[in-house]
Structure formats: C-alpha cells, structure tokens
Amino acid sequence: MTAKMPDPVILEGRTVRLVPLALDHVPDLFEAGGNDDEVWRWLPVATPRSEEELRRVAASLIENPRNVPFAVVQRETGRAVGWTSYWDVPDFDDSLEIGWTWYGRAYWRTAVNTECKLLLLTHAFDKLGHNRVLLKTDCLNTRSQNAIRRIGGVYEGTLRRHRRRPDGTWRDTVYFGILDDEWPSCRLRLEQLLNR
C-alpha cells in the first residue's frame, strides 16, 4: 500500500488541537514566543522581532508545497502557542518528517510536545499509512535530542555540515527515525507519558 500525502486536517487532543497554520494565528504566536531568542535558537531563521517578521516566516511555511504546517492551539485558552509541521514530505518512499516545531517557552516541559507528537505520529502511521517518520535537530540542541529519544525516536546518524545556521556557522544535523513496526511501542510510551 502506498502512503497517502498529508492534507491540512484538524487533529484533536486533550490538551491541544493541531489546526492548519494560518496568518490569523500570528498575533497569538508572536505573544507566545516571537522575539524570544531561546525559542528560535535552533530554528533555521533568525528570531522574528515583530509580528510582521513572524508573518513572513509563517507565510513561507504555508506556501511551501512540501510542508503541511499546523498551529498548536491550547484547548483551554483557544490560543496558538507554537507550530509544528509535516516537513519535507516526499511522494515516493512512504516516509515523512515531523519538523519546524517550536512552542512558547511557557509550554516547554509540559504535555504540549508529547501530545503533539502523539497526534502527528498517529495520523502519519495509522491514517496515512507511512512506513517511517523522521525527526532531526541541530547536534547542539540536546534538549530536542533528549525529547526525541524520550518519545521513542531511534538515532540513525549525523550529517556533518548539513546546513548553515542563521549566524553563518555550520550545523551538523542529528537524525532520528520511527518505523511503522516500532510505532505500537512508541505510541504506548507516549500515552504513558501523557497519563502521568
């Protein structure tokens, strides 16, 4: 069976809803984490210093045909607190990437990331029929690497001098993957983390 390409859909969780990213989310997003160097430290663009700069970054994600971006909306408040994406989606090998993820600092070390990954992985494996999901991060971003390992991502390797950071230095990129036959145990781990 060939996996389906992801479409913009709404994914419902207990803590968050993932909804197709729209420019209307920008004011909430800027309040949650715009102009925060620590939030944007490992992302491939410079920290947006205004809503207009963040709007341009969001527009580039929305317009990219190989990307399906979602606003992460906190159910309790109805406000967007970050975004995440199916990123660099190929149409030939039944795999996709979860990436370009950030959350406002107030949502770090909460259920938000765990539930987002559960929603995205469930949709990718169970609804779309993908064989593999890739997650990658800067070699210096140990917080992200630990979070990926915690949810069941398996280290696959490091691409050296993979891309330039916004400051011009070279980034080595650490790759993790989850295969469809690893997904049941990974899902159980995510559900257990959420139920703590």
Image: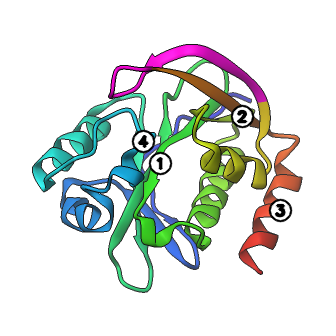
- Residue projecting furthest to the top: 161
Q: Residue at x 61, y 72 (%)?
A: 111
Q: Earlier in the sequence, mark 4 or mark 1?
A: 4
Q: CA distance from mark 2 to mark 4?
A: 20 Å
Looking at the picture, tell me which residue is in the foreground, 33 or 97: 33
Give the residue type that dot 2 points to. Phe
Q: In the rendered image, which residue does mark 4 sit on? A: 68
Crowd band around label 3 with a 10 angstrom C-alpha radius: few (<14), some (14–19), many (20+): some
Q: CA distance from mark 2 to mark 1?
A: 15 Å
Write the start and end of the magenta stretch as one range.
156-169
Q: Earlier in the sequence, mark 4 or mark 3?
A: 4
Which numbered dot is residue 176? 2
Q: Residue 129: x and y, percent?
A: 70, 40
Q: Residue 82: x and y, percent?
A: 39, 60
Q: Residue at x 77, y 55 (%)?
A: 150
Indicate the quadrant where residue 47 lies.
top left
Instruction: Report helix, strand or loop for mark 4.
Output: strand
Magenta segment's dominant SS is strand
Q: In the rendered image, which residue does mark 3 sit on? A: 189
Q: Residue at x 71, y 49 (%)?
A: 146
Q: In the rendered image, which residue does mark 1 sit on? A: 101
Instruction: Report helix, strand or loop for mark 2.
Output: strand
Crowd band around label 1 with a 10 angstrom C-alpha radius: few (<14), some (14–19), many (20+): some
Q: CA distance from mark 4 to mark 1?
A: 12 Å
Give the residue type that dot 3 points to. Arg
Give the residue type that dot 4 points to. Val
Q: CA distance from mark 3 to mark 1?
A: 20 Å
- The correct choice, above or below, for 102 with respect to 77 in the image is above
Q: With 131 as the anchor, is 26 left or right in this view?
A: left
Tags 4 and 3 in contact by the CB under 8 Å rule? no
